[in-house]
Image (cartoon, rainbow, N blue to C red):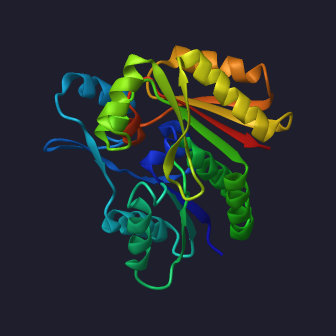
Amino acid sequence: MGSIRIVTDSASDIPLQLREELGIEMVPLKILFGEETYYDAVTMNTEQFFDKVAASSQLPTSSQPSPMEFQEAYERILQEDPNASIISIQLSSAVSGTYQSAVIGSSMVEGEPDITVLDSKTASYAYGMRVVAAARMAREGASKEAILAEIDRMQRSTELYFLVDTLEYLQRGGRIGRASALIGSILNIKPILSLDKDGMVYAVDKVRGSKKAMLRIIDMLEQACGSEPVILTIACTTGKEAAMEFGEMIKSRFNVQEVEYTTVGAVIGTHVGPGTLAVFMRRV
């Protein structure tokens, strides 16, 4: 019987050290500045990305990996362990073609490999935490069925909210109209974003001022989680001090068992911009 190996893409925003520690195979998305192409979390990290955004007159875009890139990742694993079972967890198919590339890539592998490709229906560390949990379970000898069951449970027990600092990136990406972005900026409106059950981005609420927006997110988290024990992750594109402050505000109101701070990567950053905060709260 072979090992169970976990594959993901770079939009899961799992830190390099953790990926290496748990043996997670990562297929990077691409960041494009005009004719320049960078590999997310490989040849460009979040800090470098926003430095280049500030110096560039062009709005960057992102591009999904090709099916061949996934095929090569699966084949690398199977060369190491021909009997390996692979679980591949990808960025929401509603916002990217990455999942479809992974599915096609799995079909291109010769023979009858045991590859299960999952659509996370979410973004960033909201599925990164599932990838990490799956890899830890695999290291501990859990069965594939047990790992898939835990991934499903985590999907149903995680709350996710993004708070963006500026509406400019949403407007440039076509998420909102220019007039809405202009009015929102003038009035200091901070949209609170989330993902629906199909993985589509939508505005949950709009609040004037960052502090009020944080408090509104906390209120919504209380409605969902109450006094249940939870695991908390706070992520940011830039502005780590604000992330720490937000984390302390949340910890004071919830039964937090674990807390982690991480970075929203360049792919998601392309669409939300600098100063974005994200909270991922999972019921234990």
Instruction: Name the residue rendered at 70%, 34% in the picture.
Output: 220
Q: Quadrant of the C terminus?
A: top right
- Indicate whether 239 appears above or below 261: above
Q: Nearer the viewer, residue 60 or 11?
A: 60
Instruction: Name the residue rendered at 69%, 60% in the picture.
Output: 152
Q: Position of residue 203 (x, y in %)?
A: 52, 40
**Rendering quarter of residue 183:** top left
Q: Is there any visible trace of residue 44 in the rendered image?
A: no
Residue located farthest toward the bottom when viewing the structure as drawn: 111
Q: State the count of labels.
A: 0
Q: Position of residue 15 (x, y in %)?
A: 51, 37
Q: Nearer the viewer, residue 249 or 63?
A: 249
Q: Quadrant of the N terminus?
A: bottom right
Q: Is residue 265 left or right of residue 64?
A: right
Q: Is there any visible trace of residue 28 in the rendered image?
A: yes
Instruction: Name the residue rendered at 45%, 58% in the picture.
Output: 94
Residue located farthest toward the left when viewing the structure as drawn: 35
Q: Nearer the viewer, residue 56 or 81?
A: 56
Q: Nearer the viewer, residue 84 or 154?
A: 154
Q: Position of residue 155 (x, y in %)?
A: 67, 54
**Rendering quarter of residue 254:** top right
Q: Is residue 177 left or right of residue 159?
A: left
Instruction: Name the residue rendered at 56%, 75% in the picture.
Output: 83
- Indicate whether 49 appears above or below 127: above
Q: Position of residue 51 (x, y in %)?
A: 28, 23
